[in-house]
């Protein structure tokens, strides 16, 4: 089927905007053109349209573009309307009180996962995350525990597509990661030491929806030095309990990960990365 011109143009505009969710805060025309395989002239026209509507803003000194106020307003509205974030709020606060570390909520999004909420640690030295920025599923506990409960076919597509190293500790060997994902399904939680962010440690557990779909995850994260094996072991039950509580509030009635049915295999209804 031939792509209509209007559809192709809309796709290019969306691709330009998505670059700002995955990469640096500021991008130039040449970098965008290289990333998307477009001419500089096409990219410049798209950016001018986006600037006129407040979706991106141009720094006159650096000639670099960043997301604008209209994009921020759309993102804020999307967060307000996201049931997962609203349902999880009280549970996240309790988990934060228990651990005193930064608590995060992650959602499965097209092409990976994104943090949609956080409560920052009360410690002087703490970790924060970039809300709305997309990350791959194979790096870090929040992504791995989602990946573990995707349908096997989709999981294999991700494992065999090439696993990019975000740090020196990112696991990029598919066989090694398969073994770890199996363990995550049995335990009901994942842990990470410097896999997504070099100096960070974390422990996370998956969140499920009404039909058993894996929708996201809950994590506790902080400086790697504090996330000793002992702390992870003591923290994990609370993280798993929080994820189950949020899942139940979303209507999920299945067994908890690591307790039987859900550990045996991912839900056949679980969404692909392309699901909202």
Image (cartoon, helix red, strand yellow):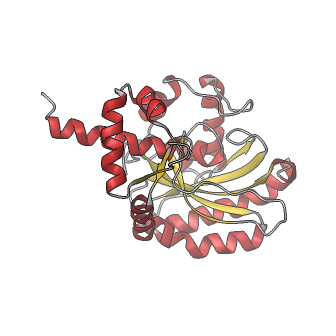
Q: Quadrant of residue 127?
A: bottom right
Quarter of the image with the N terminus is top left
Q: In the rendered view, would you say 58 is above or below 102?
A: above
Q: Residue at x 59, y 76 (%)?
A: 90
* 192 to the left or right of 147: right
Residue 270 in view of the camera? yes
The spot of residue 273 in percent (x, y) is 42, 42
Residue 150 in view of the camera? no
Foreground: 122 or 241? 122
Q: In the rendered view, would you say 152 is above or below 112?
A: above
The spot of residue 115 in percent (x, y) is 56, 55
The spot of residue 248 in percent (x, y) is 50, 68
**Extreme residue in the front direction:** 61
Q: In the rendered view, would you say 14 is above or below 96?
A: above
Q: Residue at x 68, y 74 (%)?
A: 94
Q: Quadrant of residue 212?
A: bottom left
Number of marks in picture:
0
The spot of residue 14 in percent (x, y) is 33, 44
Q: Residue at x 71, y 69 (%)?
A: 96
* 188 to the left or right of 40: right
Foreground: 215 or 103? 103
Foreground: 232 or 17? 17
Q: Residue at x 71, y 33 (%)?
A: 167
* 140 to the left or right of 262: right
């Amino acid at each position: 089927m031939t792509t209509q011109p209007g559809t192709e143009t809309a796709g290019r505009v969306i691709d330009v905007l998505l670059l700002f969710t995955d990469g640096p805060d500021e991008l130039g025309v040449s970098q965008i053109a290289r990333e998307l395989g477009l001419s500089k002239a096409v990219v410049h026209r798209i950016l001018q349209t986006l600037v006129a509507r407040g979706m991106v803003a141009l720094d006159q000194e650096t000639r670099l573009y960043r997301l604008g106020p209209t994009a921020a307003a759309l993102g804020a509205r999307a967060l307000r309307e996201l049931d997962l974030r609203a349902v999880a709020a009280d549970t996240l606060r309790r988990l934060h009180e228990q651990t005193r570390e930064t608590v995060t909520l992650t959602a499965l999004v097209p092409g990976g996962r994104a943090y949609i909420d956080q409560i920052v640690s009360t410690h002087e030295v703490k970790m924060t995350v970039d809300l709305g920025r997309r990350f791959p599923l194979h790096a870090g506990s929040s992504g791995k525990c989602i990946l573990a409960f995707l349908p096997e076919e989709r999981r294999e597509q991700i494992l065999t597509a090439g696993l990019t190293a975000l740090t020196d500790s990112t696991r990029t060997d598919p066989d090694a990661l398969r073994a770890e994902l199996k363990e995550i399904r049995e335990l009901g939680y994942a842990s990470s030491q410097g896999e997504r962010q070099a100096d960070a440690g974390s422990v996370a557990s998956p969140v499920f929806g009404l039909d058993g779909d894996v929708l996201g995850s809950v994590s506790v994260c902080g400086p790697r030095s504090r996330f000793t094996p002992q702390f992870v072991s003591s923290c994990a039950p609370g993280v798993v309990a929080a994820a189950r509580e949020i899942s139940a509030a979303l209507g999920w009635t299945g067994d908890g990960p690591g307790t039987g049915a859900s550990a045996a295999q991912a839900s056949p209804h679980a969404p692909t990365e392309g699901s909202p």
